[in-house]
Structure formats: structure tokens, C-alpha cells
Image: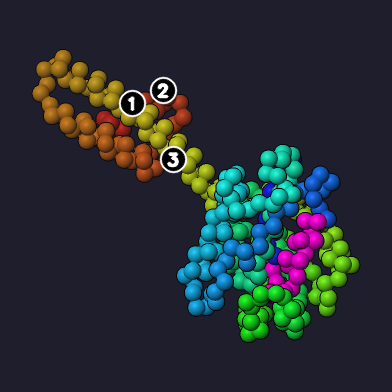
Amino acid sequence: MSRKVIICLIGLPAAGKTTLCRSLLKRYSPPSSPFHLLHLPFDSHLPQVDHTVDVKGWQGARNQIKLRVKEYLEGSPNSVVSCPMCPRTSSGVSHVLLLDDNFYYRGMRKEYYHLAQHHRCAFGQVVFNTDTASAITRNEHRMNSTVTRETIEKMNKLLEFPVELWERHVLSLKSVPNLTDGVLADRSKQVAGFIEQLLQVPLEVNPADLEAAREAERTKNLNNALQKCDVFLRKIISRKIKADRELNIQRDYSDYVKIKTSLLGKVKSGCIDLPSESDDLSLLLDQLFDDEWT
């Protein structure tokens, strides 16, 4: 059975996240790979600005990325999530979405966990353990890097490692001085094994979705009960009006309508325990109507 997997990559700038993604795409590509990898580098979609200065613009861009991921999970062909080696039309093959960002705040990751829950995807996190000095050195050798030394040091202090229950599916990669071909091959193998494990994890049900489904079912049942009671009460009123006319009794029939409205209100609020059988329900409403009238 094909599934979708969301993996958040956590780590400092220059920790090797994008480099590992490229290695994975090279080593695990169709048709030999049991899954399709889709790489979404956030840096390609975030504005090259200091997020501490242009908070609104930076957050807006992140929200747009989240929206595109949501569209991808819903099957939209217009999503920015794409990979030339991973055709979206393939069937029967699991797709793995690698979210390539720093994700130093837990809240940044949790919103994608909720997306995974809602769309019934597996969810995991890969932590790139890197000492600050190595990250700074590698960053200095990156072309056109806009990340400063101060930013990396600050991010290192703010980084929140996965510890909560919803973060239980985690792969932690050890810190290495250099990202050699051997290191990349070993890390790629570890991540591939981690993906295989995630594909075996039972699907989780979003508690909010489950409660929403239950509430919808309760509302449906209540509406059905109200509709049935309304039909029975109308029949009761019709019988009483007919009896009044046969006895030449002059009556304000709006009183009957008020009793019906009162009884339906009690049904809606749960004050009346309704029997499941129609005959029993009819008898009960007859009795309650007479009690209200007297």
C-alpha cells in the first residue's frame, strides 16, 4: 500500500541537511527505490531577509510553504513540492517529503505533524547534531551564504530537540567533522532505514478529526430524532384539532404549537429520553403532550 511520509530535518545552518538530501535523491531514485523522495528546501522559498527585521514577510513566506505542502497532500497539481525524478502520477509507491529547514523551534515542526495527522501521513524527524564551530566553518565556505556567525550561535541556543510524545519517531545523526562521501553514504543508508520504519508505523487518527466526526454523527442523530418527533407531534395536533371541531370546541390552536415547540426544545437539550421504537416514541409524545396541556 502506498503512503505519504513527512520528515522534518532539524539542525543548524551548514549542518549538511541539503547535502544529505541530494545524496538521498541520487542513491534512492526510481525505479529501483521502494519510495519516491521529494525534497523541499525552505531556503529556495523564503525571502533572503533577516526574519528578526521583516517578521511579517518571513512568516508569510513560511505560511505559503505550509499551504503548498497542504495542497500536495491533498493531491493538487499546482503544489511547489516537486522532483523531476519523482513523477507525481506514479501509483502504488510511497512518497517521502523531506522538509529541509532548520526547524529549531518545536512549534515549527508541530504544525507539520498536525498536517500529517490530518492527512493520515507518517511523520518523523531527523536531527543533525553539529557543534557550532563546525557549522560556522562550513557556512563560511558556502557560496552566497547570507547566514551570519551570530545567527548560527543564536540558533544553537534556541534549538529545541525532540522530546515530546508526538516526536517519538526520531533519527539522530552524530556530529562529524567533514561530510565525506563515506559519511554521506552511511547517513543515506540510515535515513533510508528510518523511512522504511516510518512506513510500517500504524496510521494515527487526529483526535480533533475524530471528535469532529463524533460531533457530526451526534448532530445527525439529533436532527433525525427531532424530525421524527416533529412528524409525530404534528399528527397529534391534527388529531386534537379534528376532535375539537367534532365537539364544536373553539380553541386558540397556537397553544398546541407552543406545546410542540416546548417539547422539541426539551428533546434538543436532551431532557427527554427517547425510545428507539416508533410506537413507543408515539405513545411517549402523546403522554407528554397531554401533560403539557393540563
Residue 235 x %, y %: 29, 22
Please state the total of marks drawn on the protein image: 3
Which part of the image, by quadrant, shows the C terminus?
A: top left
- Residue nearer the viewer, 17 or 122: 17
- Above/below status of 93 relative to 249: below
As for residue 88 lying within the magenta part, the answer is: no
- Residue nearer the viewer, 42 or 242: 42
Residue at the image point whose x is 81% and y is 53% from the top: 28
- Residue nearer the viewer, 251 or 72: 72
Farthest residue to the front: give it: 143
Question: Mark 2 Cα within 10 Å, few/some/many (few <14, many 20+)?
Answer: few
As for residue 21 lying within the magenta part, the answer is: yes
Which part of the image, by quadrant, shows the N terminus?
A: top right
Q: Which residue is mark 1?
A: 231
- Labels 2, 1: front one: 1
Amino acid on which the number 2 mark rests in the picture: Asp
Tell me if label 3 and label 1 are in contact, CB under 8 Å. Answer: no
Which of disc 2 and disc 3 is earlier in sequence? 3
The answer to whether residue 92 of the structure is visible from this angle is: yes
How far is mark 2 from mark 1, CA to CA? 13 Å
Disc number placed over residue 219 in the picture, else none: 3
Amino acid on which the number 1 mark rests in the picture: Val
Residue at the image point whose x is 70% and y is 72% from the top: 11
Which of disc 1 and disc 2 is earlier in sequence? 1
Q: Which residue is mark 2?
A: 279
Residue 251 x %, y %: 12, 26
Residue 37 x %, y %: 74, 53
Which segment did they paint magenta?
10-26
